Amino acid sequence: MLDVPVNADGDRPNDWYARPVADALTTFDANPNGGLHQGDIDAYRAKYGSNRLPEPKRKGPLVRFLKQFEDVLIYVLLGAAVITALLGHWVDTGVILAVVVVNAIIGFVQEGKAEQALAAIRNMLAPKATVIRDSRRRSIPGEDVVPGDLVVLEAGDRAPADVRLFEVKGLKIDESVLTGESMAVEKAVAPVAESAPLGDRKSMAFSGTLATYGQARGVVVATGTHTEIGRISGMLTEVTALQTPLLRQMGVFATWLTVAILCLAAFVLAFGLLVRDYSFAEIFMAVVGLSVAAIPEGLPAILTITLAIGVQSMARRNAIVRQLPAIEALGSVSVICSDKTGTLTRNEMTVASIATARHLFTVSGVGYVPQGGFSLDGRDVELDDHPLLSQMCLAALLCSDASLEESDGNWTVGGDPMEGALVVVACKAGLDPDYEAQAWPRTDAIPFDSQHRFMASLHHDHTGHGQIFVKGAPERILEMCARQRGIDGDADLDIDYWHNQAEEIAARGQRLLAVAVKTGAASHSDLQFHDVDNGLTFLGLFGLIDPPREEAIAAVAECRSAGIRVKMITGDHAGTATAIARELGLENPKAALTGSDLDTLDDATLRQRVGDTSVFARTSPEHKLRLVEALQANGAVVAMTGDGVNDAPALKRADIGIAMGMKGTEAAKEAAEIVLADDNFATIAAAVKAGRTVYDNLKKAIIFLLPVNGGESLTLVAAILLGLTLPITPLQILWVNMVSSVLLAMTLAFEPSEPGVMRRAPRPPKEPILSGFVVWRVAFVSVLFCIGIFGMFAWAQATGSSVEVARTVAVNTLVVMEIFYLFSVRYLNSTSLTVRGALGTRAVIVAVLAVTALQFLFTYAPFMETFFGTQPLTLTQGLLVFLVGPVVLVILEVEKRVRVALIGPRNPHPPAGGQPGQARAAHH
């Protein structure tokens, strides 16, 4: 766990929310009426600094560029470039260096903004603040606020620092960027328990949070790094971003490949000197040729290109990938930890239920779009048959200050989200807010306050009739009522009935709001508390909820079928979270753990509980980070989604961080590797499919490239050990590796997804690239290639051809075998001898035609003889070279059928049925 932050004094925990206001005023010598004096301000600024987060030390462009070369395979390539340069093979040197530099440039550009989360959080500090200094109200830059300042907050203001409130008038604050809770929080003056979680610290206004209703005054108790936002910034600097599974595997693969190449080179060098009695210069050139043959120079380029194609594919699906390897890492994700508000849900409060004196109605439609209807027991109802619905909606509409606005088809709410939901349901009931406001103009109002827990408004029509509408907490409104409105008129209040209705609505995870009315207020022109203390008529209850996205429900089901568990981590209440979890179809939604529960669990116990729990409520940023780490400790590959500042540390720590693009904060976007431009959770399922496809295609590219290099290496080793002439020169090998091999392998990046890609469990993160199947395939095909190269070289010499002609035959034989092997490797489990397999994709056809044209150039162009020592071939020689290809393809198809018959298809990841724990089992 991270250290608990300290307050501005720097000597005790930041527990102002649990202490009397007098403590804060005394500590900073602040006058609750006049504020600080200029002398105090200067002293505090000198002591505590500006209200901003410190600039972190950043790596310069040169350092970031040089870090792109920190890869074992790159070191091998650079070593090969140095050796070729020392030997005067400048063409070889130039080609190898070009590959290395291009890869570095791509990585440099893609990762240039990876560490901008701190800057994004700094920008969230309020640019302006209203304070009282020297008994005068002033507007100052947010960075000039100091501890002890008296801050005035009104609807629409962002808190400039962490403020201990001492005067509250109906203040509600949207804290979703910190807690993930979709409802605005009612604030109060009284201290709360020291153990209260962040979302329950009602005596505080936290830096960067937005006041949506009412007004308040308070004293600043923490600025800059000591605020909650500053604490999250500090967490980000301590969180270590993890390597993706592919980068880890490629590192291991490159290390083993390097060791193997160096050992083989040393063996061949020693054998040539001690056994074959070659001169050092002669055998050293042969070893250089062997090294060039064994190194897959095109692999870094293929890796980058395949990832880039995946990135472009995801961009078309509204997912912006900020770091190339992230797209592949999605393919191994086994757990998705999602924030609730704005990610799985719409972050738009909606009236879902309405209870009247006789019925409990369901309201259709989600979000702020004023479209939907009312139903009873699954059947649509007409409002004319249920006039109480219209009366309730009118009362809620007139007793609200929110507004509903439409722009380019997007509906937004101005003001409190809960009141916005009431305006929307009134529109669904056919009411026109502007017309009703003119028909019943407001005369006076009592604003909502957390102490009296209701809002009341007085209205008069144009004939002098008056009505008082009241809305608020159900238990408070019931205390103020003596009667209830029914279909046949008013009747005595049935407390038990309303308690039962409230319990049923609350069981659905919905927030409750009650409305009441008092008629006959014609003589009133102002509204007093005694006017509403009693004598009200209870109209009914509204049930409000931030509903799940419809597409998120389908996406969760698809993730489960792919063996991926989805876990909800939210700052909202447990009841609301479990209700949403049930609608989403999460595993075991009732077994929720709260932040308080997590605090009682040690790391070992948490690792046991985290696997079987899908809902985590009332969590803090530390809790989210700890949950991600616990899942990773269990071997899971974790994707974390979120949109708030509170999500940023966990986004950075997760294997893959996914931020929401539309409603997400800049802090979340900059901490993530992937940003969803449409805020659609369903895009994640598409991204996982794309990630799995990218990995499959990379695996195919490796299975294609390594046998080519293996065949070349075996040929050279055999020639040296047997004391024969080299069938292929090092420069000819480089031509094959960097031209035909790269072009053909690149086509595999465009391969479509394999059938059933989303019906198999995630691959284990520690699965090596060189699995048993890959090793077998590389060895088998390498031997085939070696036999083909040596056989055709020997045949050419046996028919009287010169060494140059025989080498030209060998090179063309190698390329023809590559082309036919490409058609085989496209289908690893099924036959390639089909019309679809023969035609290939557009990319395959273009690459084959291009390689064929280049080989004709290589063979017959006079200037190629200068570079590569080639000679033109006769028609007979060319036809025999071509016939080797079909023979290799048939042998590979026979091997494929025998292998599938004996051990089954190559599928290291068993089908996923979406059962709990199945994805986890794939990791052990």
Image (cartoon, rainbow, N blue to C red):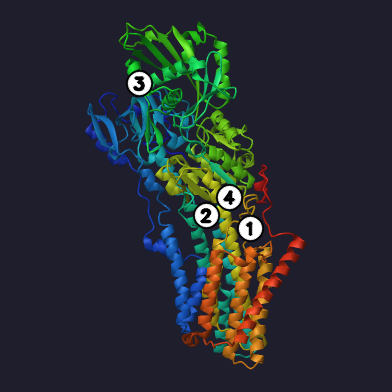
Q: Helix, strand, or loop for circle 4? A: loop
- The CA span between labels 4 and 3 is 53 Å
Q: Which residue in the structure is indicated by mark 2?
A: 327
- The CA span between labels 1 and 4 is 13 Å
Q: Residues within 10 Å of mark 1 (few under 14, many from 20)?
A: some
Q: Residues within 10 Å of mark 4 (few under 14, many from 20)?
A: many
Task: Write the residue at 32% across / 19% down.
Answer: 438
- The CA span between labels 3 and 2 is 52 Å
Q: Amino acid at mark 1?
A: Glu
* Of labels 1 and 2, the one closer to you: 2
Q: Amino acid at mark 2?
A: Ile
Q: Which residue in the structure is indicated by mark 4?
A: 333
- The CA span between labels 2 and 4 is 11 Å
Residue 692 point in image, percent of width and height: 58, 55
Q: Helix, strand, or loop for circle 2? A: helix
Q: Which residue in the structure is indicated by mark 1?
A: 767
Q: Amino acid at mark 4?
A: Val
State left or right for residue 792 relative to residue 109.
right
Q: Residues within 10 Å of mark 2 (few under 14, many from 20)?
A: many
Residue 760 point in image, percent of width and height: 65, 51
* Of labels 4 and 3, the one closer to you: 3
Tell me if I can see residue 723 in this picture: no
Q: Amino acid at mark 3?
A: Tyr
- The CA span between labels 3 and 1 is 66 Å
Lower sequence index among marks 3 and 1: 3
Checking the image for residue 435, the label placed there is: 3
Task: Write the residue at 39% across / 24% down.
Answer: 20
Lower sequence index among marks 1 and 4: 4
